């Protein structure tokens, strides 16, 4: 395809009603007047994916994942034709395609399938025929034509993958916020959209709690260097450009503060300090499909040590039986789970070779008597574990410390 091609993705809140779908159609029509080739990816309307999940839960709490995918895909399958109809009503020729029709081939891991290939011929043919192509996001099909879904938030992945396949000029993600913010504006009213951010920084942001874009979509963007713009559906701000090299005069910046209140800390107390213990513990948790985040092992006393780590709070119930088993195996004295915690992260390439950055973080927090329980760092982020009820204060303190309210 050509550089004149653009892929636009509209999230669930942007298409939550017939009226909103009609409004989005106007925006697409305006894009179509400027571009020859417009591909639109849509999410399910509003909270309809959650509603489908709730419905399935009532019928069968342990529903087969193949059937779940067959069901969940209907959310996006509903939006796509509605959007095509809305476009036709405006005199814009359009056609909707399911993931299968759009040639999105995936692995057979239901509920979190990976795109293995895109066979875009149908899309290309429709674009050549002058139509706007509206693709149902979040879904694909296996070799056997079983319907799959790409994991929650997967429409972003559909959009970026299609943009790459079609060699689009860029992928635009339309949402209910004006871009990727320097902090969650509900927590820090002075937060503002970040004009440009590198893929790596965006991935770090997503990993530490910023929810605006699906990390897998950013990964695909990074691999193929596809520029991604995140912007508001109904506003006209420039939004945030996610790209390889942000063109700011000083690249080494702190981009923003992320936080995550949905975490739990688990402590295995008095574990024998010998080789293989951590492997046993994290092997079992990993095998249960539970993601472990910050791991801290204390200095051992008398050959015994405390092993603590964070997991998503929603995984805690599922982790319990696994932890009981592991604790028995490794001879831990006790398992303590603490959900009164949260993480706050400072993200940006400024940590690369700038002395004194860490000290600024700890000074800003200690000036407000906020206790840091655990710390983890990489070259582009620092995450601290603090009490959950101090999150807003911590975010505001760090936002001010790094002067993020200014351009
Ligand atoms: N509708 C799906 C979800 O809610 C996919 C998406 O919106 O990206 O997770
Ligand atoms: Mg979404």
Image (tube, grey):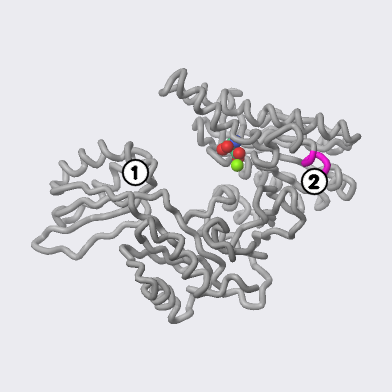
The C terminus: image quadrant: bottom right
Point 28% across, 60% down: residue: 296
Point 51% across, 28% down: residue: 53
Identify which residue, 53 or 397, lies in the foreground. 397
Identify which residue, 191 or 106, lies in the foreground. 191
Residue range corresponding to the magenta coloring: 23-27
Report whether 3 appears left or right of 48: right
Ligand 2 position by quadrant: top right
Point 62% across, 32% down: residue: 140
Count the numbered circles shown: 2
Quarter of the figure with residue 393? bottom left
Report whether 303 appears left or right of 298: left
Identify which residue, 88 or 7, lies in the foreground. 88
Secondary structure state at the residue bearing disc 1: helix
- Tell me: residue 367, above or below residue 80: below
Task: Please rate how many residues cluster around mark 2, counting C-alpha atoms within 10 Å: few if below 14, some from 14 to 19, many from 20.
Answer: some
Residue beneath label 2, please? 1
- Can you give x and y, in whole percent of width and height, for residue 6 in the image? 77, 48
Report whether 197 appears left or right of 383: right
In this rendering, does residue 116 appear at all? no
Between discs 2 and 1, the one toward the N terminus: 2
Quarter of the figure with residue 368? bottom left
Report whether 81 appears left or right of 406: right
> Which residue sits furthest top?
59
Q: Which mark is residue 286?
A: 1
Q: CA distance from mark 2 to mark 1?
A: 41 Å
Decide whether residue 25 is among the magenta residues: yes
- Tell me: residue 52, above or below residue 338: above
């Amino acid at each position: 395809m050509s550089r004149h091609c653009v892929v636009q993705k509209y999230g669930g809140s942007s298409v939550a009603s017939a009226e909103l779908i009609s409004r989005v159609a106007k925006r697409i029509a305006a894009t179509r007047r400027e571009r020859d080739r417009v591909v639109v990816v849509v999410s399910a309307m509003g909270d309809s994916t959650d509603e489908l999940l709730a419905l399935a839960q009532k019928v069968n709490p342990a529903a087969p994942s193949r059937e779940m995918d067959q069901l969940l895909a209907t959310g996006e399958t509903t939006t796509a034709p509605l959007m095509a109809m809305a476009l036709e009503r405006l005199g814009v020729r359009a056609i909707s395609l399911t993931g299968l029709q759009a040639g999105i081939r995936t692995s057979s891991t239901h509920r979190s399938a990976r795109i293995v290939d895109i066979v875009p011929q149908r899309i290309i043919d429709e674009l050549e025929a002058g139509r706007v192509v509206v693709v149902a996001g979040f879904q694909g099909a296996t070799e056997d034509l079983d319907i799959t879904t790409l994991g929650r938030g997967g429409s972003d992945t559909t959009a970026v993958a299609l943009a790459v396949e079609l060699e689009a000029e860029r992928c635009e993600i339309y949402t209910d916020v004006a871009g990727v913010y320097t902090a969650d504006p509900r927590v820090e009213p002075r937060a503002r959209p970040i004009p440009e951010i590198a893929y790596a920084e965006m991935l770090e942001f997503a990993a530490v709690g910023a929810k605006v874009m699906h990390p897998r979509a950013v990964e695909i963007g990074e691999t193929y260097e596809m520029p991604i713009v995140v912007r508001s559906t109904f506003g006209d701000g420039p939004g945030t450009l996610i790209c390889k090299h942000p063109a700011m005069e000083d690249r080494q910046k702190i981009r923003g503060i992320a936080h995550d209140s949905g975490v739990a800390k688990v402590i295995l107390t008095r574990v024998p300090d010998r080789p293989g213990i951590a492997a046993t513990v994290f092997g079992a948790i990993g095998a249960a499909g539970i993601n472990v985040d910050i791991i801290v092992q204390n200095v051992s006393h008398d050959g015994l040590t405390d092993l603590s780590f964070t997991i998503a709070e929603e995984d805690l119930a599922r982790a319990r039986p696994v932890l009981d088993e592991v604790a028995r195996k490794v001879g831990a004295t006790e398992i303590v789970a603490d959900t009164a915690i949260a993480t706050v992260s400072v993200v940006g390439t400024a940590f690369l070779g700038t002395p004194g950055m860490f000290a600024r973080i700890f000074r800003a927090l200690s000036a407000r008597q906020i206790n840091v329980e655990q710390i983890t760092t990489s070259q582009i982020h620092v995450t601290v574990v603090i009490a959950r009820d101090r999150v807003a204060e911590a975010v505001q303190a760090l936002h001010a410390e790094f002067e993020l309210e200014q351009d």
